[in-house]
């Protein structure tokens, strides 16, 4: 008997082309089980600045695309850098577009922290997600021991500790989603 596939939407808080956070999510994508599809969302930088006047029955098309991707997912996987003791504005903007989006409430979320010491961003993200009624799965949240930003996905996958922690996060998330 095969298990139904679960869908996880991965959000990187960085727009940098060579972002370690995006590389971590690509590594997670390649480590996902056959029954877990991880899709990297690449449209955060395309969203307009949040404006309640635009958050109508017909929001901008980029917002509709984000919301459809959220709706199609069973959970979110977020990996974000820390800027000025918080999360980057593009990630916050994306989350702002989801505040009034009812299908986001109760959404399961796992957070990957690529670097030890980025505690302010992680605390800020958890507070925002809590206010949005997301269900952060603490058991699936991991911190990776990365100390530089020069590793790409291939290099990350060669590090046993990175592979182990990412697989642990994904397996834990999948197990909780299947309960």
Image (cartoon, rainbow, N blue to C red):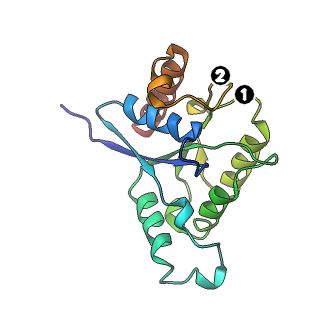
Horizontal relation, residue 169 to residue 30: left or right: right
Location of mark 1 (residue) = 116
| CA separation in Å, label 2 and label 1 | 6 Å
Q: Are marks 2 and 1 in contact (CB under 8 Å)?
A: yes
Q: Residue at x 50, y 27 (%)?
A: 166
**In the rendering, at what x and y percent does residue 169 appear?**
51, 29
Is there any visible trace of residue 111 in the rendered image? Answer: no
Q: Residue at x 45, y 33 (%)?
A: 28
| 32 w.r.t. 93: above or below | above
| 46 w.r.t. 128: above or below | below
Tell me which numbered mark, 2 or 1, is placed earlier along the sequence: 1
Q: Alpha-carbon neighbours of circle 2 within 10 Å: few (<14), some, or many (≥20)?
A: some
Q: Nearer the viewer, residue 49 or 165?
A: 49
Q: Quadrant of the N terminus?
A: top left
**In the rendering, at what x and y percent does residue 107 appear?**
52, 52
Is there any visible trace of residue 60 in the rendered image? Answer: yes
Q: Nearer the viewer, residue 100 or 151?
A: 151
Q: Alpha-carbon neighbours of circle 1 within 10 Å: few (<14), some, or many (≥20)?
A: few
Q: Which mark is residue 145?
A: 2
Q: Quadrant of the C terminus?
A: top left
Q: Residue at x 58, y 79 (%)?
A: 55
Horizontal relation, residue 32 to residue 59: left or right: left
**In the rendering, at what x and y percent does residue 72 appear?**
38, 57
Under circle 1, the secondary element is: loop
Q: Residue at x 54, y 60 (%)?
A: 44
Under circle 2, the secondary element is: loop
């Amino acid at each position: 008997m095969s298990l139904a596939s679960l869908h996880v939407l991965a959000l990187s808080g960085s727009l940098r082309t060579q972002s370690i956070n995006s590389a971590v999510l690509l590594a997670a994508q390649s480590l996902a089980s056959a029954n877990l599809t991880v899709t990297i969302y690449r449209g955060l930088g395309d969203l307009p600045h949040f404006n309640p006047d635009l958050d109508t029955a017909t929001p901008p098309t980029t917002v509709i695309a984000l919301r459809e991707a959220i709706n199609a997912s069973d959970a979110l996987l977020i990996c974000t850098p820390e800027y000025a003791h918080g999360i980057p504005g593009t990630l916050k903007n994306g989350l702002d577009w989801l505040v009034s989006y009812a299908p986001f409430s109760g959404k399961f979320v796992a957070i990957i922290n690529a670097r030890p010491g980025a505690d302010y961003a992680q605390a800020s993200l958890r507070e925002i997600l809590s206010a949005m009624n997301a269900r952060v799965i603490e058991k699936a949240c991991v911190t990776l021991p990365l100390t530089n930003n020069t590793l790409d996905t291939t290099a990350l996958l060669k590090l046993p500790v990175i592979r182990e922690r990412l697989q642990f996060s994904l397996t834990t998330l999948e197990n909780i989603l299947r309960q």
